[in-house]
Amino acid sequence: MKRDITWHLEEWKKSHRRKPLILNGARQVGKTYSLKHFGKSFYEKMAYFNFEKDEKLSQYFKGTLDPKQLIKTLSIHAEIEIKPYKTLLIFDEIQECPKALNSLKYFCEEANEYHIAAAGSLLGVKTSQEKGFPVGKVNFLHLYPLNFFEFLSATNNEKLREYLQQYSSFDPIANPLHEKLIKLLKLYLFIGGMPEAVYEYAKYENLKVVREIHLEILNAYERDFAKHAPSQEIMKIITVWKQVHRQLAKENKKFIFSAIRKSARGRDYEEAFQWLLDAGLIHKSYFVKTPKFPLSAYANNNIFKIFLLDVGLLGAQSNLSAQTIIDG
């Protein structure tokens, strides 16, 4: 599946400012797939290390964090010759080994000839809390669910994507193409951009299974709340999460805390909001008083709306059927 992040990864590889890379993004948006595809396509070799599946890996980082020594031990472990500039090292689920995360600092300072890309579930949450985070020693990229252009590519509509991206006229698009685009847009509004859901539709065109995938992903996210969130914040996180589609369904101009409970205040839910933001599961959209640049200068931080990371998941959370979205 073609992802636009590949272009950004190519730019990272060629950049004279290249440092070890951290690829952020919510769970199941395709971080591992994108890094593996990039490694196979643009390097002679790829060395993949998963700190969650292979618990032995963390032992290599308990002693010295000397990059040269780490390269030797990791090469033996993976049975791959790790060559400077020629091999992409992928540290997946790196949040499971804080010292591996910290080692990126030393790779940057002492062995930047080795190309390293790190990713992990809830890495945004972990890095916001980690004291040993290598500040200033890493590059960042963020991966989101597929956008509409990526969706067009994934559903065998590459020519239509190219046409749309190159279209610069203010004249209306020809009616047959316009109708096709509207149909595809409605499909996208139901399917969304989670890679598994898009792949299912692209291969089998089964919208029933697509919705099942949405619900599985939502359930996985909710299990993450109980597993990874601070115990005192779990119920608040769940409450905010459940409120997103309900508040968007109303004609509210902002997120209303009293809809949660009458005495609720914004400060009571600050940590819950921040956890969901750090996890990449929600987006916060602020009210702008005046439509002028820069928009941030006119934003009111006390008035905002909350959106889920993916429109398909939002539809599933709202229990909207394919017929309602596509035919409605």
Image (cartoon, rainbow, N blue to C red):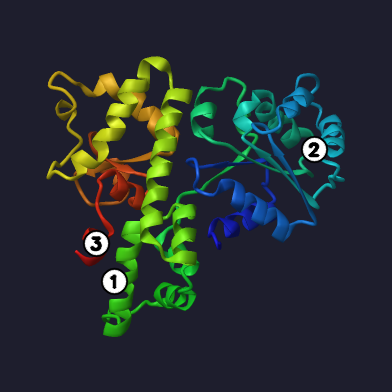
Percent position of residue 297, x then y? 29, 41
Sequence order check, earlier mark of 3 and 1: 1
Name the residue at 86% across, 30% down: 69
C-alpha distance separating marks 1 and 2: 50 Å
Question: Circle 2 sits on which residue?
Answer: 111
Question: Circle 3 sits on which residue?
Answer: 323
Relative to 131, residue 307 above or below: below
Name the residue at 76% across, 19% down: 62
Sequence order check, earlier mark of 3 and 2: 2
User: Of circles 3 and 1, which is in front?
Assistant: 3
Name the residue at 60% across, 29% down: 95
Question: Would residue 257 appear left or right of 81 to someone viewing this image?
Answer: left
Q: Label 3 crowding class (10 Å Cα cut-off): few <14, some 14-19, many 20+?
A: few
Name the residue at 30% across, 71% down: 183
C-alpha distance separating marks 3 and 2: 55 Å
Question: Circle 1 sits on which residue?
Answer: 182
In the picture, residue 325 is in which quadrant?
A: bottom left
| Mark 1 in CB contact with mark 2 (< 8 angstroms) | no
Q: Quadrant of the N terminus?
A: bottom right
Percent position of residue 97, x then y? 66, 26
Kind of residue at disc 3: Gln
Question: Would residue 82 appear left or right of 281 to someone viewing this image?
Answer: right
Helix, strand or loop under label 1 = helix
Percent position of residue 71, x then y? 83, 36
> Between 34 and 216, which is closer to the camera in this rendering?
216
Q: Label 2 crowding class (10 Å Cα cut-off): few <14, some 14-19, many 20+?
A: some
In the picture, residue 205 is in which quadrant?
A: bottom left
Q: Does residue 300 appear anywhere in the picture?
A: no
In the picture, residue 173 is in which quadrant?
A: bottom left
Relative to 287, residue 152 above or below: below
